[in-house]
Amino acid sequence: MIEARATVIAALRDSNSELDVLARVIRACVGLLPVDGASISVLSGPQERETLYASDVIAMKIENVQFDLGEGPCFEAFATRRPVLVPDLSQASVLAWPVFAAAIAALPIGAIFAFPLQAGAIGIGAIDLYRSRPGWLSADELAVALEVVDVVTAVLLGVLLGEFDGADGLRGVLSPGREQVHQATGMVLAALGISAEEALSRLRGYAFAMGRPLDEVAKDIVNRELSPLELRA
Amino acid sequence: MSGSAPSRTERESRLLHALVELADTLVDDYDVVDVLHRLVEHCVQLLDATVAGLMLSDQRGGLRVVAYSSAQTRTLELFQVQASEGPCYDCAHSGEAVLVADLSKEVQRWPRFAPLALAGGFASVHAVPMRLRRETIGTLNLFRHETGLLSDEDLLVVRTLADTATIGILQERAIRRGEVVTEQLQMALNSRVVIEQAKGVLAFAGNLDMEQAFHTLRGYARNGGRRLADVAREVVLGELRPEVVLSPRPTDL
């Protein structure tokens, strides 16, 4: 578990660009977990999505088929913002997603685990893992998968916000015990009339400019010691 | 929040009422976070506790608070620190109840948690596990101003409420499918984040503290028969204007 985290963090540190980061994190994920491939898709418009990275042609095909048809586990995770975990695809998919099931019948896909990438109401996309044989993940494997989801979310928020500055800076936004960061995000978005993504970006930008930890700045805002209006661009 | 202890019959009838109310909320499309909030509020009333809170496993080896009876920042911190130490943490890792009659004797055991709790005026704490088969999915935590432990009978009430919370999160179908536990837990954790974001919006727009913001949000959701997390999401996305949520309902005028 700790080893797995180190592998993921190392993948982050060694990367030159955001896309490179995602590719490395996903490859690390496929290496660490009993899955055969993975992909990341993000919202690129109101109803648009873009596959940023797919580890192989089957992972890419899983994405494309679902978004062409408008059904399937990854599509559903993407649209409903909740994990859709299907350890035995042959059992589940015919009933739930008949067109999708028919379209992938010839491919070696036993299980699909689709996790939304999100931070509260901020929707980013989804990460999809597939394995060629059916089967669920052990508790440790699940923990690794969820950490990968967290890291990718943080990287993508950094990418979307243009503020990626290494693993440590990103973990602060999404790790547990950061309720005040989310409350402050709401206060900033209400004060400035901007989106939640942008409010989070302003918070991080302000914290960075002041050389202070993000959660301290967030607490000051929540405790009314710092006005969210100070975060105007 | 703490009042005088209810008499036995009064409490039995309140417990029954609480369980019936919780069962009523567990219909098809119920609101997990709202159910858990009702539950911690029932704990405070039934057991004469000062503060109650519910923490769930994040399935990454950590715990996150999803419902707490007082939204004061200081209370929140009492739960946040237990992501790494404290009775909730120990309870979640052992799967056994952790009962502390006198927190002032436990400073060495929990060097961060105990002083924080004592500074908040809390003297005793009870943490009971929420268990599903061999897995502990979370803990229910009670803080009291008084030292001493609850009676066995009271403890049974706490355990019953913790079991009800477990059912509330997992639903019956979940008990048969392991991966649904993950779907439900992860969704509840993200709903909590959406609610925190929405509280921030309302706190700023209505010049409220976080506790008032939460009650306003929940009042609006209940009044419209809507899910708390759905209303919260609309507030954060700007689909529901804060003025609408903040404006008093006709019946309040």
Image (spheres, rainbow, N blue to C red):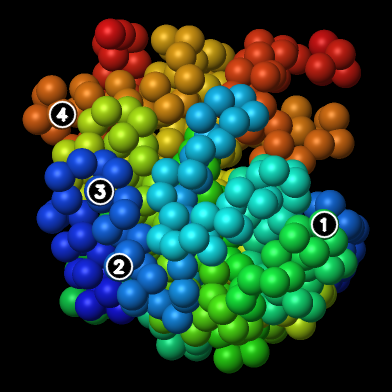
Left or right of B34? Residue A195 is: left
Q: Residues within 10 Å of mark 2 (few under 14, many from 20)?
A: some
- Report how far apart the C-alphas of labels 1 and 4 lie in the structure: 49 Å
Which chain is mark 1 on? A
| Residue that carries the numbered disc 3 in the rendered image | A20
Labels 1 and 2: the sequence-earlier one:
2
| Residue that carries the numbered disc 1 in the rendered image | A99
Left or right of A77? Residue B27 is: right
Q: Nearer the viewer, mark 2 or mark 4?
A: 2
Q: Amino acid at mark 3?
A: Asp
* Secondary structure type for disc 4: helix
Q: Residues within 10 Å of mark 4 (few under 14, many from 20)?
A: some
Up-down: is B163 above or below B41? below
* Secondary structure type for disc 3: helix
* Secondary structure type for disc 1: helix
Q: How many marks?
A: 4
Q: CB under 8 Å between callouts 1 and 4? A: no
Q: CB under 8 Å between callouts 1 and 3? A: no
Labels 1 and 3: the sequence-earlier one:
3
Instruction: Give x and y (percent) for residue A224.
Output: 34, 21
| Residue that carries the numbered disc 4 in the rendered image | A208
- Report how far apart the C-alphas of labels 1 and 2 lie in the structure: 32 Å
The picture quadrant where one finds residue B215 is top right
| Residue that carries the numbered disc 2 in the rendered image | A28
Which residue lies at the image location 47% right of the left edge and 75% below the top edge? A35
